[in-house]
Amino acid sequence: MHIGLVGLGRMGSNMRARLEKYGIEVTGYDTNPKVSDVASQKELVAKLPTPRIVWVMVPAGAITDSVISELVELLEPGDLIIDGGNSKFTDDAKHADLAATKSIEFMDAGVSGGIWGLKNGYGLMVGGTDKQVERAMPIFDALRPEGPRVEGFVHVGPVGAGHYAKMVHNGIEYGIMQAFAEGYELLNKREDLIKHLVPTFKAWQRGTVVRSWLLELLVRALEQDPEFEQIEGYVDDSGEGRWTIEEAIQNAVPMPVISASIFARFVSRQGDESPAMKAVAALRHQFGGHAVKKSE
């Protein structure tokens, strides 16, 4: 199989490497000529065998809109676009409708795994028809973690369902990260009792009900900087937490934990240097390579 990949940033470049490792030929395009295989999306499309599959892995919003709009003008009937970025699920119907005007197919794929996906594989949540999923399954099999297909991959439903599931996944992630970070701050306050802070978190990695990959990453961050002295407690958000809360309001679903976690991030941008928010910032950097502010 030979596919196109638009967007060769942190996630896209690692995804290309994993796809190639598992036998998928990839021609990539990026606005950065140093990493791009071709000079333009037009050249990318020309190099792909028909019917084409093009995976889009660029920032959500205007950039994704622009890339998909251009692809729709370049591709041919029967070609397939997969949006694997963090687009809002409501954008998927718009993109699918636009593609349909040229008889081009469209799918959405929520992708989790961050900068560790190259080694460990990516969690995939996809939206589209059964036929589209079957067509793209060699790509999903290459990207997902090794093992049973039901672990790390799900065909959630029609177009939009993949990004909806990823949105809720990220909202849950916000809440878990905040809980670990607040626990860290409380333990760190009691220096009279807690003499071995990092080993305490490390001990939780085996046999406890809170063991998880996020806990492992928190331990990794603490081992690198035990007091988070090299990082500011400033935490950005990439949209999914806000969208999850918006959906909760629309559907009258109470989400006090996730709501509190996103509001805590807002507080962190007002000059609050809490140890908890330093921990959240460190976690985001560990799993996603998200930019952090360094302490002066």
Image (cartoon, rainbow, N blue to C red):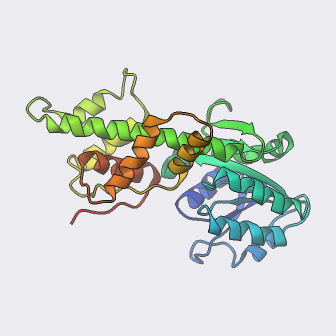
Give the image quarter of residue 219.
Answer: top left
Residue 159, percent across and down? 76, 47
Q: Residue at x 63, y 55 (%)?
A: 87
Give the image quarter of residue 220.
Answer: top left
Whether residue 81 is visible, yes or no, is: no
Front-lying residue, 221 or 25: 221
Q: Is residue 146 left or right of residue 210?
A: right
Front-lying residue, 252 or 265: 252
Residue 269, percent across and down? 34, 59
Whether residue 248 is visible, yes or no, is: yes
Q: Is residue 3 left or right of residue 173?
A: right
Residue 289, percent across and down? 44, 56
Q: Residue at x 39, y 53 (%)?
A: 285
Q: Residue at x 41, y 50 (%)?
A: 284
Q: Is residue 19 left or right of residue 245?
A: right
Front-lying residue, 100 or 75: 100
Q: In what quadrant of the picture does the C terminus appear? A: bottom left
Q: Residue furthest left?
A: 192
Say above or below: 132 vs 197: below
Q: Residue at x 8, y 32 (%)?
A: 192
Residue 205, percent across and down? 35, 29
**How many numbered discs, if any?**
0
